[in-house]
Amino acid sequence: MKIRIKNKRLIRFLSYLTIFILKTIALTCKVRYINKKYIDEFILGDKKVVITTWHRCSIYFLFKYGFIHPMVLFSPSEDGDLLVDFAKKLGVIPARGSSTRGGKEGSRRMVKFLNAGGRVVATVADGPQGPALRAKPGLVRISQKSGAYLIPMIWSANKVWIFKKAWDKMIIPKPFSRIVISASEPYIIPKEANSKRFDDYVKKMEKTLNIITLEVDKMVGHHDPNMDIIIKEDNLEL
């Protein structure tokens, strides 16, 4: 999903408008949590964590958890300016970078943030431009270098707006929807994991995210065309 706006006043206006709309929608929605104990202990608790999710989930998760002031990695391109301004107004600490442009610097900032007393960092495992639902290694490396727990999280809802032409099939909850947020058990990436072992942890993260995505989508009746591809290619099933 690419949105290029250079006018800073317009960016600020759209950020505030989006936040107002999402707050209004949130008041009408019901949220159910799967494995809420992990969210309470790790996301809302006092442990250092690296949150990993898919790009399609990013807007709502920024809105939902911006108040805990996580450092989040965003694309350094102009496409990311509106999202960064939106996130900052929600309490997020932005770091610019991606897997294809300035990603190493962004990752170093996130590791430094955690090592200097920061508690939560996050970004999307399949960003900035996909392929959708296929994980890149950046988050695993950040978790490994910082010693922070890696926690996969996904949300879905029975009624959503979906950006059908976007590569990620971004979703935003509609009013009066039933939202399900699912977290998988957090785990540590061993410092000594390298080469094949490291790649195995990347594959584990990807498979975990896709399994809980399939689970929550089935619970609410949401259909993600990108998941059809994953099911076919990976023979994924619950």
Image (cartoon, helix red, strand yellow):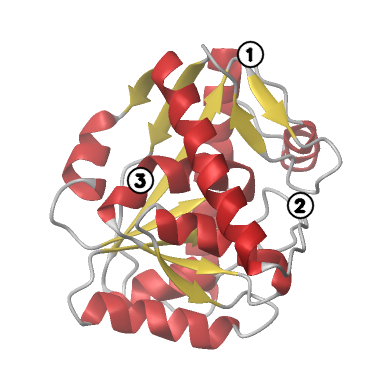
Instruction: In this rendered view, identify the residue nearer to me: 146 or 6.
Output: 6
- Circle 3 SS class: helix
The residue tagged 1 is: 221
Identity of the residue furthest to the left in this view: 46
Q: Report, in whole angstroms, how far the alpha carbon at label 2 lies from the one at label 3.
A: 21 Å
**Nearer the observer, 106 or 53:** 106
Q: Quadrant of residue 126?
A: bottom right
- The residue located at (56%, 70%) in the rendering is 137
On the image, the x and y values in percent for residue 80 come to: 65, 66
- Kindly identify which residue carries mark 2: 1
Farthest front residue? 9
For marks 1 and 3, give the one nearer the viewer.
Answer: 3
* Coordinates of residue 91 in the picture (x, y in percent): 34, 57
**Where residue 102 appears, x then y in whole percent?**
61, 85
The residue nearer to you, when weighing 126 against 174, is 174
* Residue 65: image tag: 3
The mark tally for this picture is 3
Q: Is residue 156 above or below residue 9?
A: above
Give the residue displayed 42% in from the left and 85% down from the top.
108
Q: Can residue 60 be seen in this view?
A: yes
Q: Earlier in the sequence, mark 2 or mark 1?
A: 2
